[in-house]
Image (cartoon, rainbow, N blue to C red):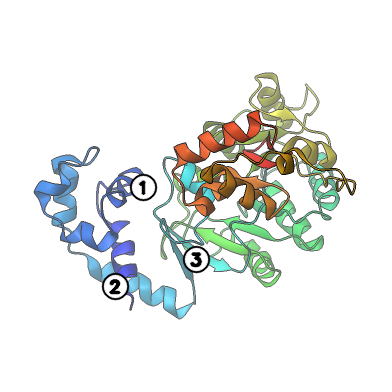
Amino acid sequence: MSTDLLYQVALTLVPHIGTVQAKILLQHCEAEEIFHAKKSFLEKIEGIGPIRAASITSFKDFSAAEEEIKFIEKYKIKTLFLSDKDYPQRLLNCYDSPTLLYYKGTADLNTTKIVAIIGTRSHTDYAKQVTEKLIKDLSGQKITIVSGLAFGVDAIAHKSAIKNNLSTIGVLAHGLDKVYPTEHAGLAKDMIKNDGGLLTEFRSNTTPDKHNFPTRNRIVAGMSDATIVIETGVKGGSMITAELANGYNKDVFAFPGKVTDTKSAGCNYLIKSNKAMLLTDAEELLQVMGWEERKSQKSGVRSQRELFIELSKEEKIIVEILKEKETVHIDEMNLKSGLSSSAVAAAILNLELQNVMVSLPGKLYRLA
C-alpha cells in the first residue's frame, strides 16, 4: 500500500478541509507532511486557521483511507492527485480543483482538444439530431467528448462519440463502485472499452445525492476547452455547468431553439445574455477554437519567427513548445516550460508583439 496515496486519500477525508483549503496546504508541504505538521504551523497558514488546523492534527480515521485503497487496488483504478503529471492540467487553473480524482479508462485527460457536450435529460428529437450531427461532423478531429453519463443529451453524446470513434469521458457524481443511472452500465463499459473512461472525485460507496451533481459539473466545465449546451430550460444542471465554465474563463457555446420552446429557453438566454456564443454547426466550433487545419507555408517563404533572432531564453522555450504541435493550451505551456506563470505571460506578450505567435479562443496559442 502506497504511503503517499494513504495520506492523499486521507486529506480528502479531513473535516472542514475542502478542495480550496487542500490546495492551499499543498502549496506549503506534501500530503504526508500536512498530517505530521504542528498545529501552530498549520493555523498560521492563510485560509486555514485554528479550527481547520485542529481538524488535521486530530484526524485519526486512516482506516477509511486504507479501505478505499483496497477498493482502488482490487478494481485497478487510477488515482490522480493534484501534483501528478496525468492529473487533468486544465483543472489546475480552477480555484477549486479536486484534490484527488479516481479514474477508470484509457482516454488521455490532457489531450489537446476536449469538448463538453451537455443538455437536458428530457430531450426533444431536435436535440438528438443536433448532438448526433455535431459529433459526426467532428469525427475527423481528435476531439475528446466529455459529459455526465446522465439520461438525455449526455447519453446521446457518449453514444455518438463511440459510434464515430471519438474518445468519450463520463464524469460521475458518485464513486466508481456503481453506475448511475443503472441503465447506463452497458454504456459505461462501452466507453471504457472504446478508449474512453469514467472519472470522479467521489470515493466508493458515495451515493449520487442531489448536491453531488453541481460538484461534478465543475469538473466537466473545468477539464474542457469548450462547453456546448445543446438544449436546456432556464434552470438545471446544464445552466450550472455553463455558469461554471464562464467563471473559469472557458468558451461556452449554445445551440439556439424556437423562442416558444421552453426546452431551449436556457440556450436562448445564454446567447441573449452573451454568456454563450451561438453555434449552428461543427465548422463554426472549429473556427472559433482555432482547430482548423492550417495550410503549410510555401517552400522558400520564411516565417516571422525565423527572421526574429533576438529571443530571450524564456521566449525560446515557449517557441520550442509551440513547434511541437499545431496549437498549445496555456495550461500545457505553463507545465512544459518549467517557468513561472508570470514569466510565461511576459514571454507570450513579447512574442505576440513581434508577430511570432498568435492567441486563439480557448486560451490556445500557435506560431504565426
- Name the amino acid, label 3: Leu
Q: Is residue 64 left or right of residue 54?
A: right
Residue 45's tag is none
Which one is nearer the viewer's eye here, 93 or 260?
93
- Residue 316 visible to the viewer: yes
Q: Judge depth for marks 1 and 3 and give the one in front.
A: 1
Residue found at the far top of this picture? 273
Q: Judge depth for marks 3 and 2 and give the one in front.
A: 2
Question: Please, is residue 2 above or below residue 165 in the view?
Answer: below
Local crowd size for mark 1, using a 10 Å CA cut-off: few (<14), some (14–19), many (≥20): some
Which one is nearer the viewer's eye here, 13 or 4?
4
- Name the amino acid, label 2: Thr
Question: Which callout, 3 or 2, points at the residue further toward the start of the chain?
Answer: 2
Which one is nearer the viewer's eye here, 249 or 323?
323
> How many numbered marks are there?
3
Circle 1 SS class:
helix
x and y percentages locating residue 231 in the rendered image:
72, 36
x and y percentages locating residue 7 in the rendered image:
28, 65
Mark 1 touching mark 3, by CB under 8 A? no
Question: Could you tell me which residue is drawn at 13 percent across and 48 percent down?
Answer: 41
Local crowd size for mark 2, using a 10 Å CA cut-off: few (<14), some (14–19), many (≥20): few
Q: Is residue 138 left or right of residue 51?
A: right
Mark 2 touching mark 1, by CB under 8 A? no
Local crowd size for mark 3, using a 10 Å CA cut-off: few (<14), some (14–19), many (≥20): many
Q: Which residue is disc 1 drawn over?
A: 19
Quadrant for the C terminus, please. top right
Q: CA distance from mark 1 to mark 3?
A: 20 Å
Question: Please, is residue 273 above or below residue 37 in the view?
Answer: above
Q: Which residue is disc 2 drawn over?
A: 3
Q: Which residue is disc 3 drawn over?
A: 176
Question: Could you tell me which residue is drawn at 78 percent across and 22 percent down?
Answer: 260
Q: CA distance from mark 2 to mark 1?
A: 21 Å
